[in-house]
Amino acid sequence: MRKAPDLSYLNSAPRVRVLMVCMGNICRSPTAHGVLEMLVQSDGLQERICVDSAGTHGYHIGAPPDSRAQLHAARRGADLSSQRARQLTARDFDDFDLVLVMDAANERAARVLCPAQHRHKLHRLTDFSAQEGIHEVPDPYYGDAGGFEHVLDLVEDSCAGLMNVLKSLESTSAED
């Protein structure tokens, strides 16, 4: 298993705010948002962990997630229907404790907006994957159903890893 990023700076945070980011905020980031939210609720950590999503580009502002993303996520228990696309802003790096991008292009676009003092908050979601060699969540938009299922596989794995890290921080801060 790979070593997850150091999030010890979150130990004293009463609430952890996580922002998922892809290009248009209609496929991958809403899927990750929904999956992480589902895991947070299942663990009863809604008061401790808050999740949102955004896109690096403003192509779909105000639109719901892609219907295929919603369908495949719903089959696995994640409801994306209340989400609406929005664009990532520089202020998001002030407002969120963790900004997780889906791929290298998203990372480059987010880094342009990210103030230097917040660079430690920017990571790829796959940095929390248990699978070696997985560095990106590929964009399924122009593909078939298999692409959306693959995205869910990667997102579920990475979000489970993220939850393990966040829960370990919570237990560490409870011991202090």
Image: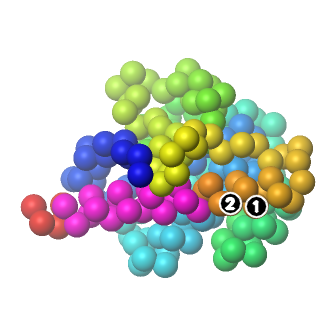
Name the spot of residue 33 as percent of width and height, x first: 60, 58
Please identify the residue farthest to the left as the structure is shown: 176
**Mark 1 secondary-structure assignment:** helix
Q: Residue at x 53, y 25 (%)?
A: 111
- CB within 8 Å, label 2 to label 1: yes
Q: Give the extent of the magenta segment.
A: 156-172
Name the spot of residue 43 as percent of width and height, x first: 43, 77
Whether residue 155 is in magenta: the answer is no
Q: Residue at x 74, y 73 (%)?
A: 74
Q: Residue at x 62, y 26 (%)?
A: 109
Label annotation for residue 152? 2
Left or right of residue 146, residue 128 in this image? left
Q: Residues within 10 Å of mark 2 (few under 14, many from 20)?
A: many
- Looking at the picture, does residue 67 appear above or below residue 100? below
Q: Is residue 124 visible?
A: yes
Q: Residues within 10 Å of mark 1 (few under 14, many from 20)?
A: some
The answer for how far apart the CA atoms under marks 2 and 1 are is 5 Å
Whether residue 162 is in magenta: the answer is yes
* Amino acid of disc 1: Glu
Label annotation for residue 149? 1
Left or right of residue 31, residue 90 in this image? left
Residue 138, by quadrant, is top right
Q: Nearer the viewer, residue 114 or 27?
A: 27
Name the spot of residue 26 as percent of width and height, x first: 76, 50
Q: Residue at x 71, y 37 (%)?
A: 23
Label annotation for residue 157? none
